[in-house]
Image (cartoon, rainbow, N blue to C red):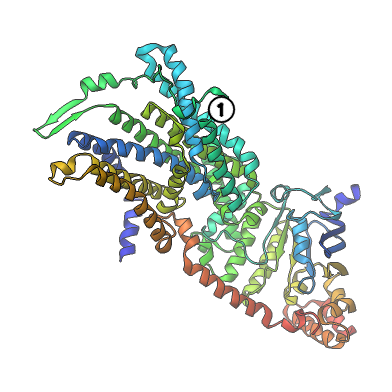
Amino acid sequence: MVADMEHLVSAKNATIQFGGLRAVDGVDMHIDKGEIVALIGPNGAGKTTFFNLLTGIYTPTEGEILFNGQSVSGVKPHVIAERGISRTFQNIRLFASMTALENVMIGRHVRTHSGAFGATFRTPKFKREEAQIQADAEKWLAFCGLSEYANEVSSSLPYGVQRRLEIARALATDPKLICLDEPAAGMNPIESAHLNALIFKVRDAGITVLLIEHDMKVVMNLADRIYVLDFGKLIAKGTPAEIQSNPAVIEAYLGKGSETMAKENLEQKATENHNHNGDSTAEESGENA
Amino acid sequence: MASNIKNALLSDKAKPWLIALAIVAIVAAPILFQGFGQMFMVRILAVCGLYIILALGLNIVVGYAGLLDFGRIAFYAVGAYVAMWVGLPITKMLGPSLGGLSYFIALVAGAIVAAFVGFLLALPVLRLRGDYLAIVTLGFGEIVRICLNNNIFGVTNGAAGLPAAGSSLPEPFGLNWLKMNAYFTVGNNFEFSFNANVYWYFIIAVLMILAIIVVSRQDNSRLGRAWSAFREDEVAASAMGIDIYKTKVYAMVLGAVWGGVAGVTFGYFQAFVSPESFTFLESTLVLAIVVIGGMGSIPGVLVGALVIQGVPEFIRGFASSGTLDAMGVHLSAEAISNISNYRMLILGALMVIMMAVRPQGIIPSKRVARELRPATIEDAEIENQEMWDVEHHEDAPSLRRGL
């Protein structure tokens, strides 16, 4: 138990079986406070399913996942949100008819308390809390650079802005861990550069980040450590540099016999990466190959 | 241009004027109708008011929380019977002069009992969704009616209704004094006198305004935002920490309160209740008021109730009021009854037309209108397609297995 307390998240043999399919199969992993950890893998590898296990949408059929030393198995999603895990969704799930501000105000729900009585009689406590909810929501909008969109209906916002708004809404729940499901999907290079900066800013605010991402540039740039899933199984873990040269990862992405091609591809990415931010490990891995 | 005018009408500046206008209309209407001898109109408007209260309660459940409830009239029935069970003994206790006050005690009791019944119903039922919930609530509404009809526990007097022969509800408190004092004439054609209809009209109007204030406050709060959130997306709402089950129970209970309030008032207004007032058709009408008026919209409910409850009753009342005779149009009793029957047909056609051309309702709430606007769905599809292209273009070969 003491050992588990050291990790923010620790999954032991986490498994979920749908009929004959083990979508997540015996995954052992851990995330420490203040890290940015990436979960990558080909389509259908079980990344989002792992998110769903972590956030209580599914219950593991075997093994367990501990958050802050407490099991999340069988715990309702809203309780998990209360304990401090928040998330975004692969296909954006904003409340489409609400404004950006209202969306983020929903994020404050879990940290506030007023109910039907306060609402009906407009007690001073209720009014104070409403003002505080709005102020906090505005603060998180500003944090994500979205203040100018506060009163726009979320469904009418540009795609990249919607992605950031989902992050703002998730941050508004005061999470300890934020799980981002493909935050850069569909973003143009400028938007994804902004996103990179935002994710670093989130980490610097003391919030641990777990992210699923297909954009290798984003992953290599952001992640402290990477876990790779394929067919539900963990096939590799390590720093971005280690992952780039891992043959199992290359095989999973490109199939057997394509290592050479893949290496070239990854090297090219690594070099680009290097050019962008002068990451020396990436350069080394390129030379070693 | 048209939208500018509409926006100006709905702006915050115009709001106090609209409210003032509405209150003047609410106060003036019964005085004018009564004064010009159209007594039946006061009664129709009072019944409309009851349906507005009922529909405001249902609006919480259907419009805000998105739970389809086909058995709303059950709470109305609970309120009406509680009025008799509580009102009759208390009337005896208070004696003839103060007996009219029993209404106010019954009102509180009816609201509490209806809320409790709503809570009991919500516990098992809210684990169901969509169609299943609709079917179960429909069943609940019918079960309540059948229980009342079968004189369950020997307290409902079956189909004969309450109060049983030999006892009756007292005259409302203060009505006699009002009859004597609130009387005036203007010229030869205008003669206003107070009667029970006018009395209940004003009680119902006050309750209706109270319901509007309370329901809009509840909508415009942390709780109301939570309702909207899970109505749109349960997965996202629960990921944001909203306890969906608990919030749904709140919606059911707070909605049921208004069923009870309207029911008690209905019981006293009619001074008689029987199971035949609480048929499935009534549940459907209340739901139709919410849907046709505009889900989640309080002005929508007001207009919806006037259209759905008011217009058919007005047609029937007008046909049989003798006003036509006075105008020189003579209808046979059969024709009058035909007009009454066709009103449901007209209502049905109206509902079909509304759903085809204006699914968001007569005065939709801003949020529901955004959800239902067809253009956004197409936009979203186009956007999804674009997103797919963007996502799968650049990295496609490296992301697909087995290439």
The residue at the point 53 percent across, 29 percent down is B112
Q: Is residue A274 visible?
A: no
Q: Nearer the viewer, residue B339 or B248?
A: B339
**Spot occupied by residue B303 in the image (x, y as percentages of width and height):** 35, 49
**Spot occupied by residue A144 in the image (x, y as percentages of width and height):** 61, 62
Residue identifier under label 1: B152
Residue reaching furthest left? B188
Crowd band around label 1 with a 10 angstrom C-alpha radius: few (<14), some (14–19), many (20+)? few
Q: Is residue B103 above or below residue A137?
A: above
Residue A214 falls left or right of residue A230: left
Q: Quadrant of the C terminus of chain A?
A: bottom right
Query: Which secondary structure, mark 1?
Result: helix
| Amino acid at dot 1 | Ile
Q: Nearer the viewer, residue B2 or B180?
A: B180
**Spot occupied by residue A131 in the image (x, y as percentages of width and height):** 52, 45
Residue A140 falls left or right of residue B302: right
The residue at the point 57 percent across, 24 percent down is B153
Residue B163 falls left or right of residue A266: left
The residue at the point 26 percent across, 19 percent down is B177
Q: Is residue B42 above or below residue B355?
A: above
Q: Is residue A22 visible?
A: yes
* Count of numbered badges drawn on the protein: 1
